[in-house]
Image: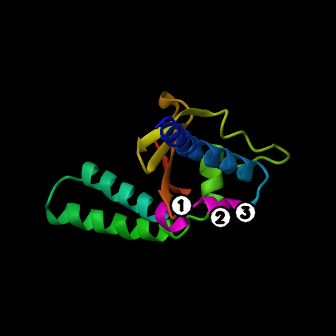
Amino acid sequence: MRYLFALLLLAGLIYGGWPYYTYYRLDAALASNDNRQLAELVDLQSVREGNQRASDQRLKQQLPGHDPVSSLVREGARLVGRTTSEEINLDWVRERLRGGPARANEPYPSLVTRTGFAFFESPTGFVARVGELGEAPVFVRMQFRDWQWRVVGVYSCGA
């Protein structure tokens, strides 16, 4: 019985530390500009879909009316959002996680040291906040899929 408990405890510790290790690998891939490893860690299709859903949700909150003008503006903004979601690529993810455009001869700032919060949101979901709450942070959502943790969302808040 003791060995079974020890085995379960070890499995729980490994599973609990796995997303943090993946987050560290993401930081290393960003710092070394390793596109191959970054592509393994980021699910671009999920990031695109998540940003489109977030954009649609913001539109619904800002234009709650059901009149024809509101629906026309919402549909136009949705079409513009679709074209911009095609612009989401690894460089877009890198720039969001950097916190701004890169400057010449400046090393990539460490993602881990700028992270204010990182914890499980569900057994298969993990969220990290890059930056402080009052300073327009970026949220990184990771999900456990196909036996690995992958980034499925990068959301900017505030300005």
Lateral position of residue 27 relative to residue 59, left or right:
right
Q: Amino acid at mark 2?
A: Ala
Q: Residue at x 48, y 43 (%)?
A: 127
- x, y percent for residue 98: 66, 45
- x, y percent for residue 135: 52, 31
Q: Is residue 125 magenta?
A: no
Q: Say the numbered circle drawn on residue 39.
A: 2
Q: Vertical placement of 58 versus 110: above or below?
A: below
What segment is highlighted magenta in the picture? 36-47
Q: Helix or strand or loop: what does disc 3 sit on? A: helix
Tell me the distance, in whole angstroms, between the alpha carbons under discs 2 and 3.
Answer: 6 Å
Residue for badge 3: 35
Asked whether 156 or 141 is in front, the reply is 141
Q: Residue at x 41, y 47 (%)?
A: 123
Q: Helix or strand or loop: what does disc 1 sit on? A: loop
Q: Earlier in the sequence, mark 2 or mark 1?
A: 2
Q: Is residue 10 visible?
A: yes
Q: Amino acid at mark 1?
A: Trp
- x, y percent for residue 145: 49, 61
- x, y percent for residue 31: 76, 48
Residue for badge 1: 147
Lateral position of residue 74 relative to residue 89, left or right:
left
Tell me the distance, in whole angstroms, between the alpha carbons under discs 1 and 3.
Answer: 21 Å
Q: Helix or strand or loop: what does disc 2 sit on? A: helix
Asked whether 133 or 158 is in front, the reply is 133
Q: Amino acid at mark 3?
A: Asn
**Is disc 1 surrounded by few (<14), some (14 to 19) or many (20+) residues within 10 Å?**
few
Does the residue at mark 2 contact the one at mark 3 (Cβ under 8 Å)?
yes
